[in-house]
């Protein structure tokens, strides 16, 4: 969870150092010649969206627990996982692979479509993750609702069968 589009980016753009049997080259050729499957978009959403906040032990629940414990490291770690899943969804819906953690927000902002206020919402989440006066999970819930509205506008279901 949270890394599907990143792993595919590595496959698409990676350079093999040793590939005795041609396995990597064949896989890379497949990634380059195959359109981004609708089933993959649905699977990324189906696996990542619920863990943001709509299930027991979601990232938001874990963030709230870390906040209650005043556990800064856990706040950072769980918020980072939340962001991983969020970005995986946004890149998948755009049928693009993301190149990893560096400048990810700026790269997401260059996508053809993304949730309203994504840049501002995620910037605020990053700046406030270690605020022990206000739990960042409250802001992430609102950001998840904006993501849900965007997914609906894109015609993407948030749950159900993935077709994979």
Image: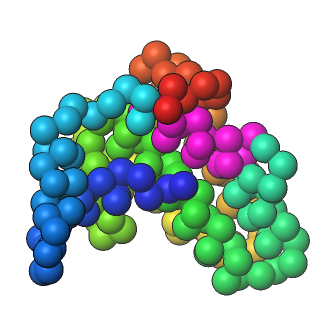
Coloring scheme used: rainbow
**Residue 148 appears at what percent x and percent y?**
58, 30
Residue drawn at (68%, 41%) of the image: 50
Q: Which residues are magenta?
A: 41-54
| Residue found at x 20% / y 62% | 23
Is 94 left or right of 163, judged from the image as shown?
A: left
| Residue 147 visible in the shown view | no
Say which quadrant the N terminus sits in: bottom right
Position of 94 relative to 61 (above/below)? above
- Residue drawn 54% across the image and 29% down it: 162
Q: Is residue 125 magenta?
A: no
Q: Residue furthest front?
A: 21
Q: Is residue 118 left or right of residue 74?
A: left
* Foreground pick, 24 / 21: 21
Is residue 123 visible in the rendered image? The answer is yes
Number of marks:
0
Residue 143 rendering spot, x and y as whole percentages: 59, 43
Toward the right, the furthest residue is 68
Residue 49 forms part of the magenta stretch? yes
Residue 110, image x and y in percent? Answer: 23, 45
Q: In the image, what residue occupies the spot 70% across and 57% down?
A: 59
The reply, left or right, for residue 97 in relation to residue 136 is left
Tell me which corner region of the image, top left, top right, bottom left or bottom right, holds residue 105.
bottom left
Question: Which is nearer the eye, 79 or 48?
Answer: 48
The one nearer the camera, 92 or 68, is 92
Task: Left or right? Give the position of 70 relative to 163.
Answer: right
The main secondary structure of the magenta stretch is helix
Image location of residue 61, percent across then percent down = 80, 56
């Amino acid at each position: 969870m949270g890394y599907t589009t990143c792993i595919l980016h590595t496959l698409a753009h990676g350079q093999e150092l040793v590939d005795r049997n041609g396995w990597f080259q064949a896989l890379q050729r497949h990634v380059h010649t195959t359109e981004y499957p609708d089933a993959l978009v649905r699977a990324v959403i189906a696996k990542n969206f619920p863990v943001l906040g709509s299930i027991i032990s979601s990232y938001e629940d874990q963030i709230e627990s870390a906040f209650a414990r005043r556990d800064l490291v856990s706040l950072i770690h769980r918020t980072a996982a939340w962001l991983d899943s969020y970005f995986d969804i946004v890149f998948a819906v755009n049928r693009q692979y993301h190149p990893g953690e560096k400048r990810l927000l700026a790269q997401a902002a260059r996508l053809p479509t993304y949730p309203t206020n994504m840049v501002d919402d995620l910037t605020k989440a990053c700046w406030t993750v270690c605020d022990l006066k206000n739990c960042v999970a409250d802001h992430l819930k609102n950001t998840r609702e904006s993501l849900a509205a965007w997914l609906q506008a894109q015609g993407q279901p948030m749950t159900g069968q993935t077709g994979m």
